[in-house]
Amino acid sequence: MANLAWSFAKLGLLDVPLLDAIAASALNISLDFNSQNISNTAWACATLEYLHAPLLESISSSAIPRRAQASRQDLANLAWAFAAMAVIDVPLLDSIASESIRKLAETVPQNLGNLVWACAKLLWLHTPLMQSIAAAARAQLADFQTQEISNTSWAFATLALQDAHLLESISSAAISKMSEFGLQDLSNTVWAFASLR
């Protein structure tokens, strides 16, 4: 089920009757889903803008006890999906935060960018998570793409979080990649610096 939903989302095919059938089946088997199945199903729903409250509740209740088995990508994708659908599920977010903090040192820049974007999109401030993200981002900013630089700066500004060391690191990374920035990423980064200074 999860792979079918993921495939349709990857292809951009919105077939509501099929998604309804997948959702109905997933409600019954979500306890058998592994963490990747759970995050892929959530990602597919968000990508296709398919908001199915019972399925999202099932995803949340299945993901929370499986958080320790979730990969860093699973956690970031799950947070991104719920944020993209503007669904604030505090128990799920707390679960993602606690597990992400443990795994942030090994998290790749894209997952950091997606996770921090999700927190800001939902206006959900989890201070220990944001402090951990700041530390992990400072250590990896040289490897960030412009979207990850933009997402990180935008998220900290949106949540009104001042971190001078992070801002200095973002500034250096942004300057070194200035020619690679697209208009949206550049605008978000400039707005973030203006907001935080």
Image: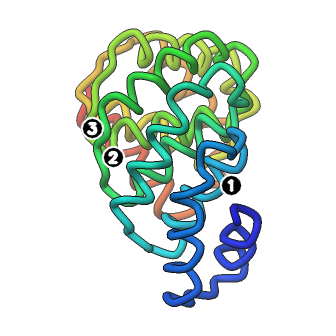
- Compare marks 1 and 2 and give the one earlier in the sequence: 2
Badge 2 local density, few (<14 within 10 Å), some, or many (20+)? some
Q: Which mark is residue 158?
A: 3
Give the Cα distance between marks 1 and 3: 23 Å
Residue picked out by circle 1: 180
Query: Vertical placement of 78 versus 84: above or below?
Result: above
Query: Vertical placement of 108 versus 36: above or below?
Result: above
The amino acid pointed to by label 2 is Lys
- Compare marks 1 and 3 and give the one earlier in the sequence: 3
Q: Nearer the viewer, mark 1 or mark 3?
A: 3
**Percent of width and height locating residue 5:** 66, 71
Residue picked out by circle 2: 121
Give the Cα distance between marks 1 and 2: 24 Å
Which type of secondary structure does the marked residue at label 3 adopt?
helix
Q: Nearer the viewer, residue 174 or 67?
A: 67
**Extreme-front residue of the structure:** 28
